[in-house]
């Protein structure tokens, strides 16, 4: 194991033995669903930087893989929608975290009449070499884990996720990003990398690594402020702003003209005709916004028309539209 991964394992070993409420700063609420009770210990061990899977991703009793189990809150929430033996696979490399998650799930079983401990299959393993069969998972997720990896290891982890997903399966990720230069002094700080701070990529680089792994469709579902690395507090001369991004990557075939990446852009036609048809699958009705991928936004802009408005990226995409 690389030394930086050993440092990360030690950080999360300590967080398993003694919950560290301030370890991460989640910005999304715990799911509030009928009959779902989250043990307090799980809430205290809610280590992440945002939301991952949305309930709409969890239809038809899916098989779900969650890498980096933490205290077990997310695997419990996923089990609410996949109430079958081994319906949720929880993976972690830290023995102490797996044991803490197991004990927390036993507590959850007592608090939730619908939940059975065998709904969750806890396995030891690394994201760099998943102990999972090819094309066997409907939904895979990770929350503020892949940010720990170097770019080389991140590439391996993304390809592993792609391998285990079924065709059209979904990989849902939440990670910090930054548009500010990250100095080498921070990149090489193994503890800061373990804390998901100094491994942050730009959004463009992050998305490019996802599509390089083979994902043909990518949705940027949310982007919000996360942390500040300030001079005097960290080894940097410039203020570094971190944001938390939530992305869904879909194992769709790669289009010949490149991936479809949705960053929350929309097109609105306001011309005199009944509708506008670009004859490439996009029909714009007057003054009805249509969600479009960045590739389509560029193609429409290149038409040079003055009766089509194309919005900037909102970095919020909630489905619908076309590519």
Image (cartoon, rainbow, N blue to C red):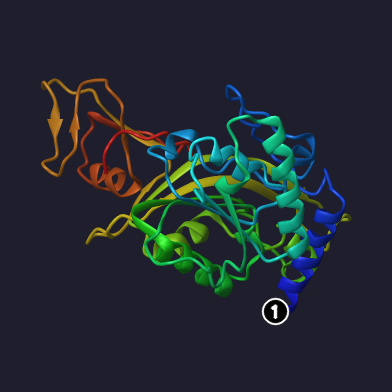
Q: Residue 265 location, x and y as percent?
A: 38, 37
Residue 292 lies, in percent from the top left, at 31, 39
Q: Nearer the viewer, residue 301 or 291?
A: 291
Q: Residue at x 48, y 34 (%)?
A: 55
**SS under mark 1:** loop
Residue 319's x, y, as percent?
A: 37, 35
Is residue 42 visible in the rendered structure shown here? yes
Residue 68 location, x and y as percent? 64, 56
The residue at which mark 1 appears reads as: 2
Q: Is residue 68 above or below residue 283?
A: below
When asked about the image quadrant of residue 211, the answer is bottom left
Is 130 placed left or right of 106 in the picture? Answer: left
Task: Quadrant for residue 104, please give it.
Answer: top right
Q: Is residue 46 visible?
A: no
Q: Residue at x 58, y 25 (%)?
A: 33
Residue located 24% across and 42% down the image: 300
Q: Nearer the viewer, residue 314 or 190?
A: 190
Task: Return the residue nearer the eye: 269 or 69.
Answer: 69
Q: Quadrant of the C terminus?
A: top left
- State left or right for residue 47 relative to residue 169: right
């Amino acid at each position: 194991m690389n030394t930086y991964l050993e440092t990360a394992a030690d950080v999360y070993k300590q967080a398993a033995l003694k919950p560290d409420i301030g370890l991460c700063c989640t910005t999304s609420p715990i799911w509030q669903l009928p009959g779902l009770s989250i043990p307090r210990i799980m809430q205290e061990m809610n280590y992440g930087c945002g939301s991952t899977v949305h309930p709409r991703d969890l239809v038809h009793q899916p098989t779900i893989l969650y890498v980096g189990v933490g205290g077990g809150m997310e695997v419990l929430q996923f089990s609410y929608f996949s109430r079958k033996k081994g319906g949720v696979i929880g993976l972690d490399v830290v023995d102490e975290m797996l044991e803490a998650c197991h004990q927390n799930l036993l507590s959850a079983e007592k608090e939730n009449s619908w939940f059975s401990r065998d709904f969750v299959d806890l396995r030891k393993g690394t994201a760099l070499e998943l102990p999972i069969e090819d094309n066997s998972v409907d939904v895979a997720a990770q929350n503020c884990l892949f940010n720990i990896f170097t770019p080389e290891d991140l590439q391996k982890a993304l390809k592993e996720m792609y391998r285990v997903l079924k065709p059209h399966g979904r990989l849902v990720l939440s990670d910090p990003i930054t548009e500010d230069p990250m100095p080498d002094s921070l990149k090489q700080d193994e503890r800061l990398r373990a804390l998901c701070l100094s491994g942050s990529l730009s959004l463009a680089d992050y998305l490019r690594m996802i599509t390089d792994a083979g994902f043909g469709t990518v949705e940027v579902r949310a982007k919000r402020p996360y942390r500040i690395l300030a001079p005097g507090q960290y080894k940097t001369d410039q203020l570094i702003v971190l944001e938390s991004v939530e992305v869904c990557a879909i194992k769709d075939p790669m289009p010949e003209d490149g991936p479809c990446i949705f960053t929350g852009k929309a097109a609105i036609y306001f011309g005199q005709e009944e509708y506008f048809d670009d004859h490439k699958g996009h029909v714009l009705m007057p003054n009805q916004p249509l969600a479009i991928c960045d590739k389509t936004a560029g193609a429409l802009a290149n038409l040079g028309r003055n009766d089509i408005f194309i919005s900037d990226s909102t970095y919020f995409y909630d489905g619908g539209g076309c590519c």
